[in-house]
Image (cartoon, rainbow, N blue to C red):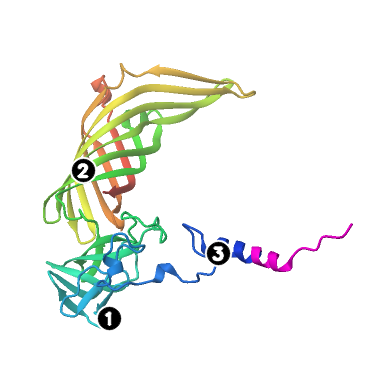
Amino acid sequence: MTNYIPDVKLLKGLFFIMLYCNCFSQVGVRNAFDTRNLYNISFDAKSSESENDDSIIKSNPYLTPLIDGFRYNAYLDKIVDSQGKVTNISNVRLGDYLFVKKEFYPIWKKKPSNGYLIDLGSNSYIRIQKVIRNDYNPRMNKKSNNRYEQKITYYRKIEDKIKQVKKNEFDKAHFFIQLGYIQSGLNNFSSEGFKNRNSVYYGLGRTFHIKSSIDLIGHFFYSKNGGYRYYRELEETGKKIIVYNTIGLEVLFSKQVKKIVFLTGLRTNFAVKREQRKASRRLYGFRFRDEFTSLDNTIKKISPLGATLGFSFKLLESINFEVKYNRGISVISIDNSKKTRLNSLQTGLTYKF
């Protein structure tokens, strides 16, 4: 029996056919021998490929058409001529837009950037950039396959610096959320050895702009108030806790003086829980026992009136740090002879939308 010797020429032919199929016939992925960086290809705005909705690269990097020999490349952040060459122009009007090259501060950045802004007048600016979409596929031939998407940011000259602001920064009203630490006490229980209770508060509110540097603030928040003290009785130790959890409604006026905002107003508290909890355990062993005593007949459900004073200042863009002290005016004890009032000190953060 003779040994079979494969045809070398036939094997070479099959090899090159398979190589051709794998390297040059793939759909939806880059060819193996295609070393072009497709994401750096730039097309002239007048080219047929940039204007053809069915082209692989649908959109172009230009924000404006060619006007008086110039246009704005929003991807490179440059003013270019008809040939796409970068020009060193500090300001130019392209149609209805006046492009000016300025130093500006992006949000939450301490170091300035330099680039082109559109001057809207009255110390207001916008910046429009084109960025490559994350879901862009250079091999997909669809009308919805746009290469670029627009990114618009807003700026205003504040304290001789052009700073980024929110789109609604100068609207008449803003919502905000708050979160912080509260230390509260009931003065009548303090005389019995109860210490102030420490907890958190959180809430939602809205600010209404009245006139220059004066705002009206309305918000409601939830807080855990009361007091606590440790005790020791016979073979038991533990902690007694006065639980007076409330939803507070507060109306404040604010006045900004330079970088500090001063606050003053009134507060009403509505109690959602009124009880005394006794958490105890034996001196020897691990048995715990909680006893709950209702304070519905001791403390009123509503504390109608309290006076608030405080201040706040900006930490970061849209984030303020606040300190407020509320002094109870209304007596909340059912027995008026005890003159129980709720007082609290708050420190926390607010975030403005």
Residue 257 x %, y %: 18, 59
As measured in the structure, the alpha-carbon distance from the residue carrying label 1 to the one carrying label 3 is 35 Å
Q: Residues within 10 Å of mark 3 (few under 14, many from 20)?
A: few
Amino acid at circle 1: Gln
| Residue linked to disc 3 | 23
Q: Nearer the viewer, residue 87 or 268?
A: 87
As measured in the structure, the alpha-carbon distance from the residue carrying label 3 to the one carrying label 2 is 61 Å
Residue interval drawn in magenta = 1-14
Residue 206: which numbered mark, if any?
2
Residue 152 x %, y %: 26, 61
- What residue appears at the point 40 percent right and 37 percent down from the top-left corner? 198
| Residue linked to disc 1 | 83
- What residue appears at the point 55 percent right and 64 percent down from the top-left corner? 23
Q: Secondary structure at mark 2?
A: strand
Q: Secondary structure at mark 3?
A: helix
Q: Residue furthest toward the left?
A: 211
- Relative to 236, does residue 104 appear above or below in the rendering? below
Q: Nearer the viewer, mark 1 or mark 3?
A: 3
Q: Earlier in the sequence, mark 3 or mark 2?
A: 3
Q: Is residue 312 magenta?
A: no
Residue 35 x %, y %: 50, 71
- Relative to 123, does residue 314 appear above or below in the rendering? above
Contact? badges 1 and 2 (CB < 8 Å)? no
Q: Nearer the viewer, mark 3 or mark 2?
A: 3
Among the 4 quarters of the image, the one containing residue 136: bottom left
